[in-house]
Amino acid sequence: MSLDPVQRLRGAVARLERQHQSAQAAAQTAFEAAHRHAPSRSAATPPLESAAIHVFWRTHTGQRDWPVEWVHGALLARCLSGLEVDDWPALAPLCGRPVLFLANHQVAIETLLFALAVPAVLGRPVLSLAKREHRDSWLGRLGAHCAAYPGVRLPPMLAFFDRADPASLLAMADDLGQTIGREGLSLMVHAEGTRARACRQPVARLSSAILDLAVAWALPVVPVRFTGGLPVTPAPATLDFPLGFARQRIHLGRPLLSEALAPLPTGARRQAVLEALNRTGLPWEHEVAGVADPRFGAAVRALAERHRLQPQKAAVVQALAAHPPAIGLYRHLIAGLEGCAAPPCASAAEGAWFDGLLDWARRHD
């Protein structure tokens, strides 16, 4: 007896669902197997919960349940799976102190995720150094717009320099030092300055100028490793989001105190920090890509096509849709993209901010 078209369709959907679940289970198994190679963590490592991140930023800004919190919360929920500390007893004494974080670099969004998540663990906002060209990227413009929300002051999260001119970093050192001191910030630098295209690669380059600043400013150096964002086989281009919209992990390594680094010659100092960075987290030679989310990816592509958005911006808007506190903001943006009347705002300044966010989403950078 032949099946009617509806039954055939249901059967096809069921088969696709089983294939999807099987593929996700296989990817999850590989990801967990890679993490079993990681060194054991201290039992005293504090868990990083979204509530802790909210508490930190609500205390710091004096705001709660506001649009920028929804944007940041949606991106954290979408892109970050957690944070691990290699040696919490060694790191805990640095809570509340300014430090220099030195990290590998996988994808663009991780810089923002780090600046949002890590302050909840160590108690200070983080200023990240970024290439000058990122100032006008989709992410740079989003960060600037969030920082411009009316009536709220966020700490600076990005400082821009010319990576092609190493002397530019030294030229901005005085201003950078004053900003760090005035705002009570830690500093984060991607050691190699540019994104990798594959995992299982040790960090091999590090500017001695960065370490000179750490010694001059008496900043402990905390190694950072991002994992789960890249494939084993090199991607054709650098990525803005983790491959397949997987979720990354942040690993914080054992800190190196500036007084231990100060006596070392330049080459030995650089080598000591590189070795510490490459020991952080799971062994780099065992890393695999995080578990992809093809459904989210399909939703992003559909949204981008329907509203002619850049893929990165469609990903941000779709992340809002998947984050319950941000549903109202998502609907506001969709109404604007579809040319419908947006819900009224509490003030003209807030309405102008929403209009600016809509302009950001529509703009092709």
Image (tube, rainbow, N blue to C red):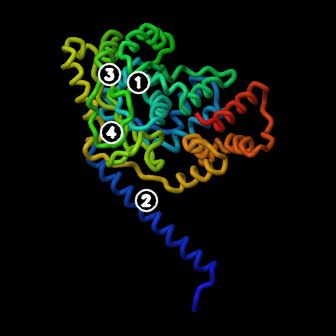
Would you identify the image quadrant in which residue 211 lies? Answer: top left
Q: Position of residue 7 (x, y in %)?
A: 60, 80
Amino acid type at image mark 4:
Ala
Q: Nearer the viewer, mark 2 or mark 4?
A: 2
Question: Vertically, is 179 above or below 126?
Answer: above
Would you identify the image quadrant in which residue 66 lies? Answer: top right
Q: Position of residue 23 (x, y in %)?
A: 42, 62
The answer to which of 126 and 94 lies nearer the viewer is 126
Q: CA distance from mark 2 to mark 1?
A: 33 Å
Instruction: Specify few, some or many for label 3: CA neighbours under 10 Å numbering under 14, 14-19, or 20 or more.
Output: many
Residue named by callout 3: 221
Which is nearer the N-term, disc 4 or disc 3?
Answer: 4
Which is nearer the N-term, disc 2 or disc 4?
Answer: 2
Q: CA distance from mark 2 to mark 4?
A: 29 Å
The answer to which of 103 and 165 lies nearer the viewer is 165
Which is nearer the N-term, disc 3 or disc 2?
Answer: 2
Q: Residue at x 54, y 52 (%)?
A: 296
Would you identify the image quadrant in which residue 272 lies? Answer: top left
Q: Nearer the viewer, mark 4 or mark 3?
A: 3
Q: Position of residue 181 (x, y in %)?
A: 46, 11
The local secondary structure at tag 1 comes to strand
Residue named by callout 2: 24
Q: Position of residue 335 (x, y in %)?
A: 74, 44
Q: Which mark is residue 9?
A: none
Q: Which mark is residue 188?
A: 1
The local secondary structure at tag 3 comes to strand
Q: Which mark is residue 43?
A: 4
